Image (cartoon, rainbow, N blue to C red):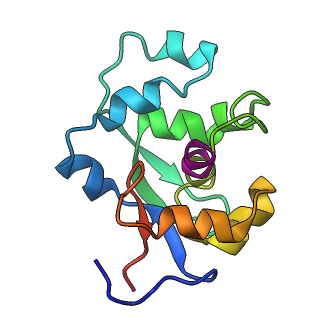
Amino acid sequence: MSLVKPTLNTRYHIDFEWWKQSENDWHVHLRGLLCAEHQQMFADHGVGDMLDFIDPETAEVRPMNGIQQAILSHCARQPEFLTGQTAMVEAVFRVFLANGNSPLSAAELSDRLGRPANIILTTLSGMRVYKGIRPVQE
């Protein structure tokens, strides 16, 4: 943990190491976010299958979990993926999944979610880590 107090401009992301160290199963959680079409598609596939993902903005190729790639390329674009009724921490988590886990600040998350930046900051900067969402270590 950093001793620097986070601000509205502190950038956050999903820390996949947190998921590995905690007893939460990342793949089970991701499967629950798949649309019906992809739930059927992944029913018989291994949960840890990795695929090459090409970032459409940078053309960078990086390995990505197949389920995460399906969420990024299709499921996150469905209207029911993120609604006004989605709980805030879950909404923040889904924003990171939808943007390929590119770091965002509380202010940027506020713009995307229409929720107060100070509430997002207070939630994400507390002692408890929610869904692996942590400040980027720069």
Compared across the picture, whether 115 is left or right of 33 comes to right
- Residue at the image position 63 percent from the left and 80 percent from the top: 8
Q: Residue furthest bottom?
A: 4
76 or 13, which is in the foreground?
Answer: 13
Is 4 situated above or below 32? below
66 or 91, which is in the foreground?
Answer: 91
Quadrant (top left/top right/bottom left/bottom right) for the N terminus: bottom left
- Residue at the image position 55 percent from the left and 33 percent from the top: 70
Magenta residues, start to end: 88-94
Q: Quadrant of residue 28?
A: top left
Q: Quadrant of residue 135?
A: bottom left
- x%, y% of residue 9? 62, 83
Quadrant (top left/top right/bottom left/bottom right) for the C terminus: bottom left
Compared across the picture, whether 95 is left or right of 83 comes to left
- Residue at the image position 62 percent from the left and 14 percent from the top: 37
The answer to whether residue 36 is seen in the rendering is yes
Task: Count up the numbered dots.
Answer: 0
- Residue at the image position 46 percent from the left and 70 percent from the top: 125
- x%, y% of residue 34? 55, 25
Magenta span contains residue 78: no
Is 114 situated above or below 9? above
Name the magenta segment's main secondary structure. helix
Q: Quadrant of residue 112?
A: bottom right
Compared across the picture, whether 78 is left or right of 95 comes to right
- x%, y% of residue 62? 42, 58
Magenta span contains residue 89: yes
- x%, y% of residue 29? 41, 31
56 or 15, which is in the foreground?
Answer: 15
The answer to whether residue 102 is seen in the rendering is no
